[in-house]
Image (spheres, rainbow, N blue to C red):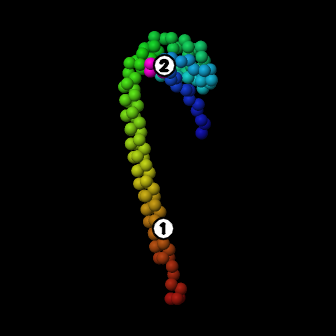
Amino acid sequence: MDLAIEPDIYEPNINEKGDYIDNIPYSSKFQNGLRCPCGTRKEHVFDSRPSFTSHIKTKTHHKWLQELNTNKLNHYTENIKLKELINSQKLIIAKLQKDIDESNQLIAHLTKKIAIKENANLEIDLISF
């Protein structure tokens, strides 16, 4: 199995006022490529700083950044809900894993009992010979 290297996802910075602002990442961030979630070029991967610099000047990217700032409270609320969902799913997964482990123990126990019973039936009474 080959490992695929995925491009990084661009994250704008937050200024002192709490607003999202563009920040051009260091050149090292472009090593695996950089994908911007703004939707201007949905599957495009930027491989250099100059190409990304020109991208963040587009109207669609500016509109996306403005929308992030307008809806930041909604993003915060959604983040809290998603964390709660993840925690509840972790509990569900843990319970299911426990059920699986208990079932596997029961199967092993019953298999052992069946094997013992079959071995008992195979024993031959040597005295009757």
Q: Position of residue 100 (x, y in %)?
A: 43, 54
In the image, which residues are magenta? 14-19
Say which residue appears at 47% left-offset and 19% top-offset.
16
Q: CA distance from mark 2 to mark 1?
A: 66 Å
Question: Which residue in the structure is indicated by mark 2?
Answer: 15
Does 45 sit above or below residue 121? above
Which mark, by number, is residue 48? none
Q: Residues within 10 Å of mark 1 (few under 14, many from 20)?
A: few
For image coordinates 52% across by 23% down, the residue present is 10
Amino acid residing under circle 2: Asn
Closer to the eye: label 2 or 1: 2
Callout 2: SS:
loop
Instruction: Pick whichever, 14 or 97, lies toward us.
Output: 14
Residue 101 position (above or below residue 72): below
Q: Residue at x 41, y 41 (%)?
A: 87
119 displayed left or right of 84: right
Q: Position of residue 116 (x, y in %)?
A: 48, 72
- SS at badge 1: helix
Query: Relative to 60, is 6 above or below?
Result: below
Which residue is identified by label 1?
Answer: 112
Q: Locate residue 74: give its quadrant.
A: top left
Horizontal and vertical percent position of residue 88: 39, 42
Quarter of the image for residue 49 reads top right
Please state, as top left, top right, bottom left or bottom right, where the N terminus lies in the image: top right
Q: Is residue 36 left or right of residue 29?
A: left
Compared to 89, does 37 lie above or below?
Answer: above
Instruction: Where is residue 41? Give x, y as percent.
Output: 49, 18
